[in-house]
Amino acid sequence: MQIAVVLFDRFTALDAVGPYETLGRLPDAETVFVAEHTGPVRTDTGNLALTADRTLADVPAPDIVVVPGGPGQSPQMENETLLDWLRAADATSTWTTSVCTGSLLLAAAGLLEGRRATSHWLALDFLKRYGAEPTGERVVTDGKYVTAAGVSSGIDMGLTLLGRIAGDEHAQAVQLLTEYDPQPPYDAGSPAKAPAHIVEKLRGRSRFIRT
Amino acid sequence: MQIAVVLFDRFTALDAVGPYETLGRLPDAETVFVAEHTGPVRTDTGNLALTADRTLADVPAPDIVVVPGGPGQSPQMENETLLDWLRAADATSTWTTSVCTGSLLLAAAGLLEGRRATSHWLALDFLKRYGAEPTGERVVTDGKYVTAAGVSSGIDMGLTLLGRIAGDEHAQAVQLLTEYDPQPPYDAGSPAKAPAHIVEKLRGRSRFIRT
């Protein structure tokens, strides 16, 4: 079983690392970080780089595709090399997944047409423009397509898919090993729960989501 | 404000990325990933590398020190270069923090003597051997020392410290941007909550924590 996590300039680190740390603990699976070119790929803050060990061309047919999002996703939506790779990989994948605005890349590749899907809460409207049916859920499964909401939701997505593939017991063991017993100090993690003026302020900051 | 995240061979990626993605969103702060040598540093699975952009020597006096854990922490507990750096950095830091078994490194450097602290649930006993007072809490603050439990708890730690430094509103905005509204598909994230036979099985697997 091969899991390919796709990197691109200015992706959001946790989008990729959440599924890697959970789904990547699938028994007998190899997780490989891929990008157009091998080598370090910078995240959205510029302060961190993750290494792409293989090029997209090196990994043409992964069993599971994981596409993170981030501010750098906009130019990628017109990157035909990446979109072609996504379409080809999807043609043989068992699962095609995304975190955050990664779903906009799947949508731009034409893979979410008429499908229920999700994305970062600031990007749900964009998803609709590409023919997907956005839902407010944190993890959405439609056929073999599993999309997750913003950034941290990739952990929930990873555990959900891990349970589906390897069974509940294995997923629970990984949850326990990663001590995923969340206790956020605030209850502001969704637009429905956060103080309204904070939600409005972020809606006004267009730099996070541009498409 | 400078935040130094310490990398070493076979660290756990999410331990480092959780605080980076939350605490690292501190206004006007620079987050820098440091290690003994610059370049890619492999994580515990071998499938991912994060780039250390600076050596420990390049960053002698960060305001905030973040030490992740992972299976690779054992040999580091005898790495005098790293322990000396931790002691020196701690002498001038505003906050000295850890995630998972990173607290064992702080303890080995002599920084947690007589202090309340936490670690991965499988490592709490080891913490005691170094004179710390382990608690069962997810995030423990004792003076300027903030330690977090296993792997994913670095997200909670990062938000907690972010709120303390930059205020509740800023921390809530970061929680909303990272859409940290956890909905794990299981409730197995702590030894008190996970099925007993899974807890026992992991206790028997000594490879995760060795010291």
Image: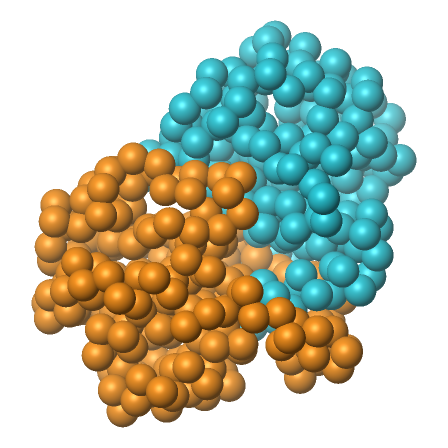
Chain colours: A orange, B cyan
- Is residue B6 visible in the rendered image? The answer is yes
Quadrant of residue B49 in the image? top left
Quadrant of the image for the C terminus of chain A?
A: bottom left
- Is residue B206 visible in the rendered image? The answer is no
- The residue lying toward the viewer, choosing from A76 and B126, is A76
Question: Looking at the image, which residue sits at the far top?
Answer: B80
Q: Residue at x 51, y 63 (%)?
A: A151
- Image coordinates of residue A179 in percent, x first then y, are 57, 52
Judge left or right: residue A192 versus residue A155. Answer: right
- Image coordinates of residue A191 in percent, x first then y, are 65, 80
> Is the residue A108 above or below the residue A29 in the image?
below
Q: Residue at x 19, y 44 (%)?
A: A55
- The residue lying toward the viewer, choosing from A154 and A30, is A154
Question: Looking at the image, which residue sits at the far right?
Answer: B143
Quadrant of residue B9 in the image? top left
Total numbered labels: 0
Q: Residue at x 62, y 37 (%)?
A: B31
Judge left or right: residue A59 versus residue B195. Answer: left
- The residue lying toward the viewer, choosing from A83 and B108, is A83
> Is the residue A19 above or below the residue B147 in the image?
below
Judge left or right: residue A29 versus residue B182. Answer: left
> Is the residue A137 above or below the residue A45 in the image?
below
Judge left or right: residue B190 versus residue A102. Answer: right
Quadrant of the image for the N terminus of chain A?
A: bottom left
- The residue lying toward the viewer, choosing from B131 and A4, is A4
Q: Residue at x 62, y 77 (%)?
A: A203
- Image coordinates of residue A187 in percent, x first then y, are 73, 71
- Image coordinates of residue B167 in percent, x first then y, are 84, 56
> Is the residue A196 above or below the residue A69 in the image?
below
